[in-house]
Amino acid sequence: MLAISQSGRSPDLVAAATAAKARGAYLVSLVNDEESPLFALADLALPLCAGLEKSVAATKSFIATLAALLQIVAAWTQDQRIADATTALPDLLDRAWALDWSAALPVLQNADHLYVAGRGHGFGIAQEMALKVKETCGFHAEAFSAAEVRHGPMALVGPGFPVLLTAQDDESLPSVRALAEEFAGRSAPLLVAGIGQAPGTTLPALDADPLVQPILLVQSFYRMVNTLALARGRDPDRPPTLAKVTETV
């Protein structure tokens, strides 16, 4: 069983890990806080080493988790391509942070709603982006797979309903690029990243292995969403009503 947590202190997660161990599971914990119950409980504890998360909305530990999972997959499969892509991440993340996504600010500063769409392993990144918009900027954002948004959710897309569409350079790219055309055809304010030539406002993205491209996109996004939260008069480090550790029982 893999248990993943920034704090390692959420009671529901610790309880699930305890129950799994009681049934004979070998527990591997990926945890940022090495003093936490989940870290101590593990048969094999893997520290994320992201340093103290000072804000409520975790960011660097999210990226560290993704890098750790890639390292596990690389070792498990003996896939040198995955190993090389993971080794390249630190320098690429520095470059991704420096990219200027400020073109998104005029589109999102007064927005009330947002769709974030991605496909394949980029869908999880779309979910993280939508969550961070809700947490730090205080308006509704929802993530969809680029394969699913064409169904019912497309009915809401139009003028005044912005969309952030992301992609990585793999077999999913042509379908995501076609989706950009559909969004543009509905006159939606469209932001695109990682798609190349596409309608809408293009946000810069790095050329890299498709396995790590979504991680680089979320790194660039984090800088933008921090600026967006401040522009909307909010403190991105201390969202109202949220706590650092979610006490779900």
Image (cartoon, rainbow, N blue to C red):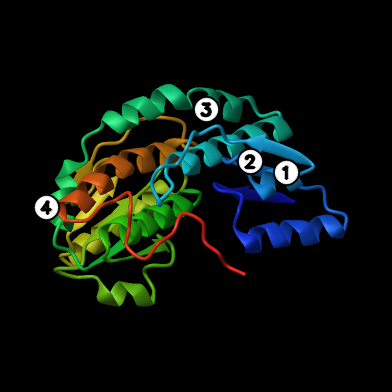
| Whether label 2 touches label 1, CB < 8 Å | no
The residues tagged by marks 4 and 2 sit, at their Cα atoms, a distance apart of 42 Å
Mark 3 is surrounded, within 10 Å at the Cα level, by few (under 14), some (14 to 19) or many (20 or more) other residues, namely many
Residue at left offset 31%, top offset 63%: 115
Where, by quadrant of the figure, is residue 151 drawn?
A: bottom left
Question: Disc number at residue 40?
Answer: 1
Q: Residue 106 shows which numbered tag?
A: 4
User: Are dots 3 and 2 in contact, CB under 8 Å?
Assistant: no
According to the picture, the residue beneath numbered tag 3 turns out to be 85
Q: Earlier in the sequence, mark 3 or mark 2?
A: 2
Side of 28 where 225 appears, left or right: left
Secondary structure at badge 1 equals helix
First in residue order: circle 4 vs circle 1: 1
From the image, state whether disc 4 or disc 1 is nearer to you.
1
- Residue type marked 4: Pro
235 is higher (above) or lower (below) than 157 = above
Q: Residue at x 49, y 33 (%)?
A: 51
Amino acid, disc 2: Glu
Residue at the (45%, 49%) spot, across then down: 122
Q: Nearer the viewer, mark 3 or mark 1?
A: 1
CA–CA distance between discs 4 and 1?
Answer: 46 Å
Q: Which residue is mark 2?
A: 35
Q: Residues within 10 Å of mark 4 (few under 14, many from 20)?
A: few
Residue lying at 37% horizontally and 53% vertically, measured from the top left: 129
Q: 123 and 130: which one is in front? A: 130
